[in-house]
Amino acid sequence: MPVGTQGTVKAVPQNILEDLGAQIILGNTYHLYLRPGHELIARLGGLHKFISWPRAMLTDSGGFQVFSLSKLRKLTEEGVRFRSHLDGSSHMFSPEHSMDVQIALGADICMAFDECTEYPADEARAAESLRYTMAWAARSLQHFRANQHKVPWHNQLIDSDGGLATQSLFGIVQGGMYPHLRRESAERLVELDFDGYAIGGLSVGEPRELTRQVIAEVLPLLPKDKPRYVMGVGFPDEIVEYARMGVDMMDCVIPTRAARHGLLFTSPESTGFARMNIKNRQFAEDPNPPDPACSCLTCSRYSRAYLRHLMQTGEPLGGTLNSIHNLAFYLTTMSNLRSELDLIAP
């Protein structure tokens, strides 16, 4: 799922995302709450209408962003009080407030408010963090179910079959890198009966093998008839591995963030590279497309030499064209995986 933190997948227009085949993108509750504000977005018809995105959307609860503000936050049973990274103003995020913001934004998939555990963290810290997450998960679900139909534009949401759409809420498995805490979190969340389940608290600095171990531990505990989502991963080889393990959904800023720094993901059999730093001097006179095996807008029209020139001169178009290719590469990878795993409906 391409990440559009502040109401935009950076540098890529929505019509191009549609052409690339993106079925769902992400927004972020914390950032959209601060700017332009969820109430303003609700007055303008919800986030879909505000950003002109007709397909599905998922919003993070804001928990990870609050986690990243460790020096600017204070945790209590009620929630998290934090200072804005923009102007230092004080704000309070509780499970109920996170739900109110996400309901107002109109996300198709909302996420329960959680406390993301840092790495490394000792067992006592991970257990305390899990205590917050589980209490907040129950409060998130209760508030969501009681309030999800209260925004005035809700009845304007139409699903792909032309019927009335509903918002869904996913619970987030936490517990640090401790298998017994992860199992406890997963089992208790399943008892609460969320619409889907995410595995959070990964990609926070832990070794990749540890990431895989956590996923392998948790996946069998989550219902196969509901979406299973691993948050914040990963590189192309990682998403392939995790999908084959049984993960249904993943998101990451890597394809667009890497693109803005000149890193392209390509087909090794076509280019000799799995990762191509287009800023390298060897591409200065290279007339070939970035990836001859790719048919995206970038690869069908532009050369490696031109993309290198754009990066060398700091032209914003370079980041856009690189991002289009990387997103195309990721989305094509996932499409091929769906075929491989026989998940496409007949």
Image (cartoon, rainbow, N blue to C red):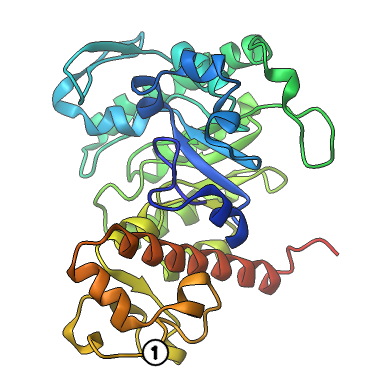
Residue at 52% across, 85% down: 293
Residue 188, percent across and down?
54, 29
Residue 243, percent across and down?
56, 62
**In the image shown, does 292 or 336 lie closer to the viewer?**
292
Residue at 40% across, 26% down: 32
Mark 1 residue type: Asn
**In the image shown, does 154 or 72 lie closer to the viewer?**
154
Q: To which quarter of the image does residue 123 belong?
A: top left
> Can you see residue 156?
yes
Residue 174, percent across and down?
41, 36
Q: Is residue 248 above or below residue 126?
A: below
Badge 1 marks a residue whose secondary structure is loop
Number of residue marks = 1
Residue 65, percent across and down?
31, 32
In the rendered image, which quarter contains the C terminus? bottom right
Q: To which quarter of the image does residue 54 belong?
A: top right
Mark 1 — residue? 288
